[in-house]
Amino acid sequence: MTLPEDAGGISEVCEIKGSLHLIGKNAIYRVQLADEIDPQRTNIHIPNTHQQVLSCGTECRFVRQTLMTAKWLFNNNVLGSAFNYKSAINLSFEALQDFSAMHAAYEDLSVKLNKIVEELKNLAAKERTLTVPTAGDVRGLTESFLQKADHVAIDLFNIAKLFYPDGIGQRWFQSLYDLIAKKYGSDDPFAKFMKQALPFLQFVRNARNAMEHPDAAKSVKVTDISLLPSGELNLPCIEILHLETPQPSVCLPTLLGYITDELGSIFESVVACLCGHNVQPFAGLQLWIIEHDENQQKAYKCRYGYGTRIGGQIVPFG
């Protein structure tokens, strides 16, 4: 099947939500065969189809941190036949879809603000009156962004539940940390990582709750472009009031970019840690998680994979 040239060629193939997906460098397409569209073959002229589902592919770091990491690590041969591979892949793809929307919102806002900043260089007040430009519905954009960020965290937690279905629950990622620390010790690298990641993950959850359910104890203030006493224009800002995870006023695109980058890194690392702590020997080989070198990352399109020792050297497995 030939994809549009802007897909960048097919890099990988993956079944997601029951459909074959072709992953290119710049886009991801869902494929439907004629037999799927018309199982009874009532119309012999029905063609096979492909439809773009995401305008990002293996060249995008979020694709690598989510779907590609999942594709290589969620392996029943390594994690055991009981592991729910399909659910894990589907959750990873859902997280990727939200990452894509988050990044698009951040990019669109940044481009718009940069254009406004350039236009303002030649703008002057007329008769002591200045028309202050607007960045649009920044509050609506922020609410949608925080919802999607929380969805990513929920998808990651649900992936963790596939590994420990009876061990974690209502206390969210705190329960995952407690289980890992108890099972492997508080000095275990996974436990240490989770301890560091917990405040950020809780911040994401609290920010969404404060945005959607404000009260006297929690709320989110988002401001449009405004004029400062100095005569300079201030870009949109966000301030999060919360007893546990407050965020002083900061430039809105700065915070959106930080949340996107940090959440991507945490997603990738937690998936690697979960798999590393549940890996099983395969065909007599002892396996563990390795971090690929630069050339291997180009080949596998992700940062982490499985490795084993052969002839005194650690080599990638899979």
Image (cartoon, rainbow, N blue to C red):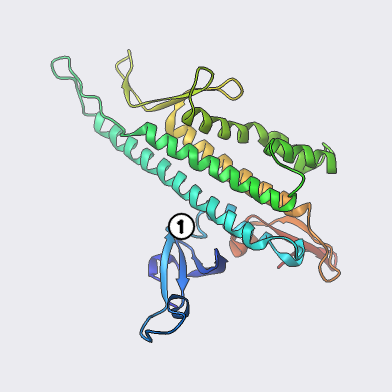
Viewport quadrant of the N terminus: bottom left
Query: At 78% across and 51% down in the image, what residue appears?
Result: 277
Check the image and report above or below for 265 versus 24: above
Residue 33 screen position, x and y as percent: 46, 77
Residue 35 visible to the viewer: yes
Left or right position of 248 against 162: left
Nearer to me, 38 or 293:
38
Query: At 58% across and 31% down in the image, what residue appears?
Result: 203
Disc 1 crowd rating (10 Å Cα; few below 14, some 14-19, many 20+) is many
Residue 61 visible to the viewer: no
Residue 111 screen position, x and y as percent: 35, 41
Query: At 62% across and 47% down in the image, what residue appears?
Result: 156
Q: Quadrant of residue 70?
A: bottom right
Residue 142 screen position, x and y as percent: 43, 35
Query: At 42% across and 71% down in the image, what residue appears?
Result: 50
Residue designated by label 1: 56
> What is the number of callouts on the image?
1
Helix, strand or loop at disc 1?
A: loop
Left or right position of 17 against 114: right
Nearer to me, 16 or 14:
16
Viewport quadrant of the C terminus: bottom right
Left or right position of 35 against 65: left
Left or right position of 22 against 171: left
Check the image and report above or below for 283 versus 141: below
Q: Quadrant of residue 295?
A: bottom right
Nearer to me, 13 or 128:
13
Q: In the rendered structure, which amino acid carries the disc numbered 1?
A: Cys
Nearer to me, 167 or 302:
167
Q: Residue furthest bottom?
A: 44
